[in-house]
Image (cartoon, rainbow, N blue to C red):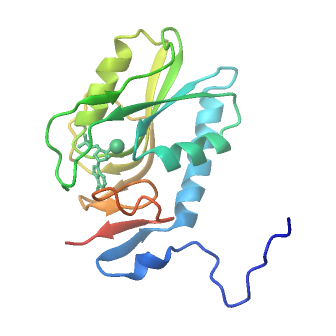
Amino acid sequence: MKLQQKSSGESSGSVNEHTSSGNLKPFITSEEIQARIKVLAAQISRDYAGKIPVFIGVLNGSFIFISDLVREVSVDVEIDFLKLSSYGDSKISSGEVKLLKDLNCQIDGRDIIIVEDIVDSGLSIKYIRDLVLSHNPSSLEFCTLLMKKGLSNLSFDIKYTGFEIENKFVVGYGLDYAQKYRNLKEICILES
Ligand code: IMP
Ligand code: MG
């Protein structure tokens, strides 16, 4: 099959068309995200040399991040997913975390890396930590693309963080508002 070539006037595709519409303010470009992922993946590859870590993505928000991340990691990996209750159609956490999909793999004795899209209040990640630790993994670390500054009062470290951001509601690159905007290539601030 012959692939069609782009005409010279077409954009490189790093910005989705709907980004320029309405209340979306471009925040972190696709190029910045990919560059940061390469750095995180190199760090993870060094830290897990000779091991086969299990990456556990937290659905739905982390699906794009985890798929780009694992493709930059040079050690063998296994992948599984957890699904937690979401914010629903709200911008504010309900304060209650529910497990909607449990793990499918055995994680006792394994090296686990939890992959999140964003840590906001920290409630979800605390819930996941307790859940995973109850299965006796050999080690447990967290990797989040975004971390809202100063909001979560975590008693443990997040070893791999993509970007620390101010307390704004962001969408794109997997993150949604009422299930919309996950397919933006970049991250935008959703202004109200
Ligand atoms: P936490 O439990 O408050 O830390 O929230 C974690 C989850 O809430 C994330 O995994 C996201 O799914 C969602 N979330 C938090 N902040 C945002 C945001 O700014 N945009 C989109 N989703 C968010
Ligand atoms: Mg999430």
Q: Position of residue 116 (x, y in %)?
A: 41, 41
Quadrant in which the C terminus is drawn: bottom left
Q: Position of residue 84 (x, y in %)?
A: 31, 34
Q: Residue furthest right?
A: 1
Quadrant for residue 95, please give it: top left
Tell whether 136 sits left or right of 111: left
* Total marks in image: 0
Which quadrant of the view contains residue 50?
top right
Q: Residue at x 57, y 44 (%)?
A: 67
- Quadrant containing the N terminus is bottom right
Q: Quadrant of residue 175?
A: bottom left
Q: Residue furthest front?
A: 1
Horizontal side, residue 28 vs residue 111: left or right: left
Q: Where residue 65 appears, x then y in whole percent?
A: 51, 48
Residue at 65 percent of width and 85 percent of height = 10
Q: Residue at x 26, y 61 (%)?
A: 169
Q: Quadrant of ligand 2?
A: top left
Residue 74 vertical placement versus 36 (above, below) = above
Residue reaching furthest to the left: 95
